[in-house]
Amino acid sequence: KIYPNITGDQCIEKVSQNMHKRNYSFGASSTQSSICTNVFNDNNIINTIQEILDICDSDDNGYIDKEEFIDFLNEWNIDEKLNDNDINLIFDQLMLEDDNDDDDDINNEASCDLFMHRLHQVHTDHPNYSARRAVYRVCRRLLKVATQK
């Protein structure tokens, strides 16, 4: 028989590399590995959406106007799935109603914080959703609330 000619350290390194490539469905190490992966992916999805929302918020005031909102949806190709009326209803759900606010610009803009709050709710319910699917689900939920009024 021919035995491999590698050191113990090299053997351990090869075994550990192979274990990270596999997707185990049982055992403590697979659970720990999937938890680490999910935490990374969760933060990555939320951060990705937040970054794109920040880019669309051109004046950096935490609010986006209708054009910026459509640009945000366009980043995910979601605007193609919704008609103009649906987009208007969703946008209206993200607008904050504050009678004490004298700034007309903010009154005509949607809250980025409110969208991110809704996103966190969707992500809690569906942690395996992709970023695109999570954004779409937020839109569908907002549309459902708007049509129930």
Image: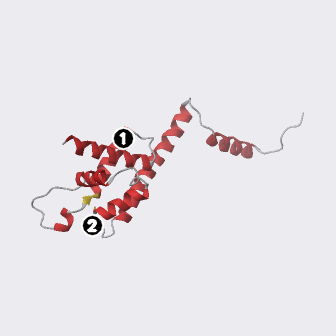
Q: Is residue 142 above or below residue 108?
A: above
Say which quadrant the N terminus sits in.
top right
Q: Residue at x 35, y 60 (%)?
A: 70
Q: Position of residue 119 (x, y in %)?
A: 34, 48
Q: Is residue 87 visible?
A: yes
Relative placement, left or right, of 99 versus 141 is left
Amino acid carrying mark 1 in the image: Thr
Say which quadrant the C terminus sits in.
top left
Q: Is residue 49 above or below residue 24?
A: below
Residue position for label 1: 124
Q: Nearer the viewer, residue 96 or 92?
A: 92
Relative placement, left or right, of 113 versus 129 is left
Amino acid carrying mark 2 in the image: Asn
Quarter of image, res 50? bottom left
Q: Residue at x 32, y 64 (%)?
A: 67
Residue position for label 2: 61
- Furthest residue in direction right, as rendered: 1
